[in-house]
Image (tube, rainbow, N blue to C red):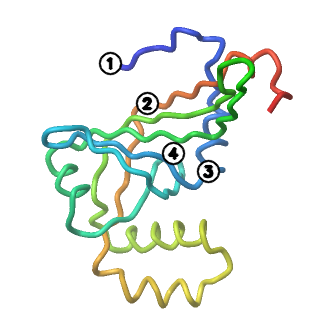
Amino acid sequence: MFRELRHKNQELSSQEIEEILLRNTSGVFALAGEDYPYAYPMSYLYFEGRLYFHCEKKGHKIDHLKNNDRVSFCVVDQDRVVADEFTSYYKSVILFGRASIIEDEKKKLEMIRLLSDKFSPGREERREEIINKYFSALEMIEVEVEHLQGKQAAELVSSPQSL
């Protein structure tokens, strides 16, 4: 179902993919829309091999997820344009998986806390105020990863120090 990279030498290792997903804070989340694919930038948490994000209980994301749980998510870790070479030195990761709304309230709370701590560490008291205020109005989405793939520019394969 998932294609292999044609340029295997540009493929990132599992460790590099994991580091990119843990290090970054946003990516582009894509789902199957009614008439067109629906993709949008999203802050996320990558935790224990799964992707998490929050959204409102109503809207495009929820509607599309209810119709088709297959999603993809792309994180661009690096994109340095090298004008003289007519290229860019990039590193990116794409994941494919199945998304679902977290129904278990305890797990939902745990994941929103972890997501909050990623973006606002050390602010537990304020975090709890905000969570208590908005918790009933939000959904936490969990993506079970089915396939991960990372790729880098050919130029980075031969000289990774040229970042």
- For residue 106, above or below residue 127: above
- Label pair 3/1, CB-CB below 8 angstroms: no
Circle 1 sits in a helix, a strand or a loop, which is it?
loop
Q: Which residue is mark 1?
A: 1
| Residues at marks 2 and 1, CA–CA distance in whole angstroms | 10 Å
Find residue 118 and report its horizontal and vertical position in percent: 60, 66
Q: Secondary structure at mark 4?
A: loop
Q: Residue at x 64, y 31 (%)?
A: 91
Give SS at disc 2: strand
Quadrant (top left, top right, bottom left, bottom right) of the N terminus: top left
Give the class, few, some or many, for how many residues have Cα within 10 Å of label 1's Cα (few <14, many ≥20): few
Task: Please state if 26 lies on the left or on the right of 29 as rendered.
Answer: right
Of residue 146 and residue 83, the one placed in the foreground of this image is: 83
Q: Nearer the viewer, mark 1 or mark 4?
A: 1
Q: Position of residue 108 (x, y in %)?
A: 38, 69
Q: Which residue is mark 2?
A: 147
